[in-house]
Image (cartoon, rainbow, N blue to C red):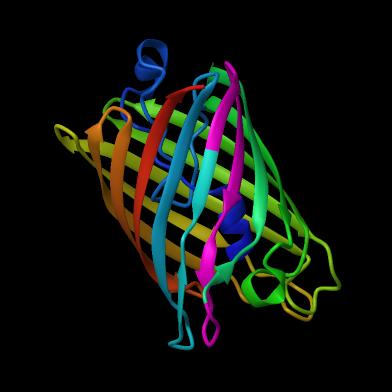
Amino acid sequence: MRALLLAVASSLAPIALQGQEATDPRAVRPERPTVATHAWTVAPRYLELETGVEWDRNPDASHTVLTPTLLKIGIAARTQLGLQANLNQPPGASLGVGDVAIVLKQRLADSLPVLGAFAVIPSVKFSTGGLSHGTGTTDWSLLLVSSNQLGPVSLDVNVGFARRSGDGTSVPRTATLWTVSTGTTISGALGLAAEVFGLPATSGPAGARGAVAVLAGPILAVRPWVTLDLGAIVHLRGPQPDALCLGMVYNLGRI
């Protein structure tokens, strides 16, 4: 499940994002700190970096530290390519390089009835971290994304599916994900994101019961091209870790 979350990344659609996209191509499109992602993409030929630190408290009371990082580039008006990697320190292990993923976001529409802006996000994750700092599998994932702006409030709904290589003994061969997230401006440059997400039960030798959790955190727009965020995840049921995360999104400009 952790591999699926890292593969799809996560986001809050900023308020008035559509207007920003039209007037300021360097305005950040933050995909932190939530699990859900929005349908919008980085402007063509602009490069954006998202990075941070996450601290997990696992159900067995052990701890994991990781540094989820996503480098995104706009390659067309509605197309974005991303490279995702992380350092992580699982329980009882040293800090090491985790799995690497290539993520493509393709926005198919900006204003469909009900769905609003709609995007598909296929990705492939490679076993660069091995079993010590990753899943030991190659994963193929697909995420469907719907984004709407309801007055001052954004609403993002995601449904995801992942298929993994291997025999299912270390991690389940199939995993799914659903999320509903929202965000709004509190005052000036300060915003708030909130979300509920679920990881349905999996089968096989490494199968696990389903999990549901909530996430909330503030986002501070330091500049149009720099945002900082703080988030907390609290599990409601199932084996989802509780977590704290601190992140930054920085648009490096046109290349």
Q: Which of 84 and 188 is in front in this view?
A: 84
Residue 225 visible in the snapshot: yes
**Residue most extreme to the right:** 167
The residue lying furthest to the left in this view is: 187
Depth check, front residue: 27 or 253 = 253
> Going by the image, does 131 lie left or right of 156?
right
For this orientation, the residue located farthest to the top is: 23
Span colored in magenta: 72-94
Q: As displayed, is residue 32 above or below residue 245?
A: above
Numbered label tally: 0
* Left or right, 64 with reference to 216: right
Q: In which quarter of the image is residue 4?
A: bottom right
Q: Residue lying at the far front in this picture: please name it.
A: 255
Residue drawn 43% across the image and 87% down it: 61
Residue 104, x across and y down, in percent: 66, 35
Q: Which residue is found at the position 33% from the left and 50% from the top?
A: 194
Q: Is residue 112 visible?
A: no
Q: Where is 31 relative to 136, above or below?
A: above
- In the image, is residue 223 above or below residue 234? above
Q: 163 above or below 209? A: above
Q: In which quarter of the image is residue 245?
A: bottom left
Magenta segment includes 74: yes
Q: Where's the N terminus, which quadrant?
A: bottom right
Q: Magenta stretch containing residue 255, yes or no?
A: no
Q: Where is residue 51 in the image (x, y as percent from the top left)?
A: 43, 50
Q: Please state the horizontal and vertical placement of residue 207, each as a whole percent of the image.
A: 71, 76
Q: Main secondary structure of the magenta part?
A: strand
- In the image, residue 251 lies at what x, y percent? 40, 31
Residue at x 27% of width, y 37% of height = 184
